[in-house]
Structures are given as structure tokens and as C-alpha cells.
Amino acid sequence: WMRKGQASVARAGSREIGVAGFISRDVLQKFDIKGDVAAIEIDLDALMESVSAWKMAPVSRFPGVPMVLGLLHGRELTYETIAAAVRSLEIPYLQEIGIWDRCVADPSKDEIKTALGMWYQAIDRSLTQDEVAALHRGIGERLAAMLPVRVIG
């Protein structure tokens, strides 16, 4: 009932908690609704069952370094697959990874551009730009060897 490519799923582990996005044109036509309609569906039981005790991690008093990694790849490769591959690399000081941007680079090609936002931070010291840049380059090289992606930035 959601438009393909315009919906997101929220999960707790492997369990689906909710879905949000735009309602498909077919559904809108059946009810004679014009325009776009966004909707969200939340499984409250699943949401409540996913709540667990808070886990606190130490907070660094040293600044972090944000970086962006651009990738070009086929439409079938999902952000989840890319993020899981990055996490499997166990990169030192890489604290966070998230989607920065995802778009169709060229409508005439079957390619998507995905930009990953990454946050590097040490708990015991300030990281240098050189060491973060080296770690970041390594991620791009290893991803290109693991997945059908081209590093573009």
C-alpha cells in the first residue's frame, strides 16, 4: 500500500516496528484521493516489547571528526547491506554510520549515489585528520572489494 522507493521500515533487531511513507497511487485512486498522502503505521505491541534497559557508554571529552563517503552502485544494493558491510569491518574509532544522502545519479543509468555520514572519535585523545583520512580511505577500498560499488568521494 506504500509507494515503492518512498517508504521506510523501522525495526528493533529483526522485528518490524513500523512503516512510514507515501501511499501508493493505486490506493489513492480507489478512494478518489488527489495529491500525495503520507502515512505511518506503528505496531505498538512490538514497540513496547522492544524497550529495554538503557546502556550507557562513556562519553569522550575529545572532539570527533565527521566524514562523508560517496558510493555509486546499482539500485538493487540497499543501504542496509552497505551499512552492515561497513560495520563488519570493525574500523577503529568509527562510532557512528548513517545515511547522508541517497539519490539517482543519472536517470538513464541503473545507478544510485549513496553518501554515508561517519563519525570518528577516540575516548582517550583527539584524532588527527591524517589518521582519520587513512581509516576512511581504507573503508572505501575494502568496501569496493566486498561490494559492487565505486567510491566517488
Image (spheres, rainbow, N blue to C red):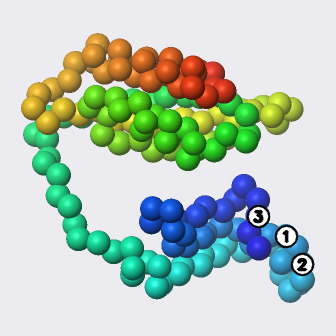
* Quarter of the figure with the N terminus: bottom right
Q: Residues within 10 Å of mark 3 (few under 14, many from 20)?
A: some
Helix, strand or loop at disc 3?
strand
Asked if disc 2 and disc 1 are in contact, CB closer than 8 Å, the reply is yes
Q: Which of 102 and 122 is in front in this view?
A: 122
Residue 98 lies, with reference to residue 105, above or below; the image says below
Does the residue at mark 1 contact the one at mark 3 (Cβ under 8 Å)? yes
The picture quadrant where one finds residue 117 is top left
The residue depicted at 49 percent of the width and 21 percent of the height is 142
Q: Which of 36 and 81 is in front in this view?
A: 81
Label 2: which residue? 29
Q: Which amino acid does label 2 sit on?
A: Gln
Q: Which of marks 3 and 2 is in front?
A: 3
| x 30%, y 40%: residue | 95
Q: Distance between the residues labelled 2 and 1?
A: 6 Å
Q: Where is residue 6 in the image (x, y as percent from the top left)?
A: 70, 59
The disc labelled 3 sits on which kind of residue? Arg
Q: Is residue 112 above or below residue 15?
A: above
Q: Would residue 38 be visible to someone looking at this image? A: yes
**Label 1 environment density (alpha carbons within 10 Å; few <14, some 14–19, many ≥20):** some
Q: Nearer the viewer, residue 5 or 147?
A: 147
Callout 1: helix, strand or loop? helix
What residue lies at 17% left-to-right and 58% top-to-bottom?
A: 56
Answer whether residue 151 is visible to the viewer in this image: no
Residue receiving disc 3: 3
Residue that label 1 marks = 25
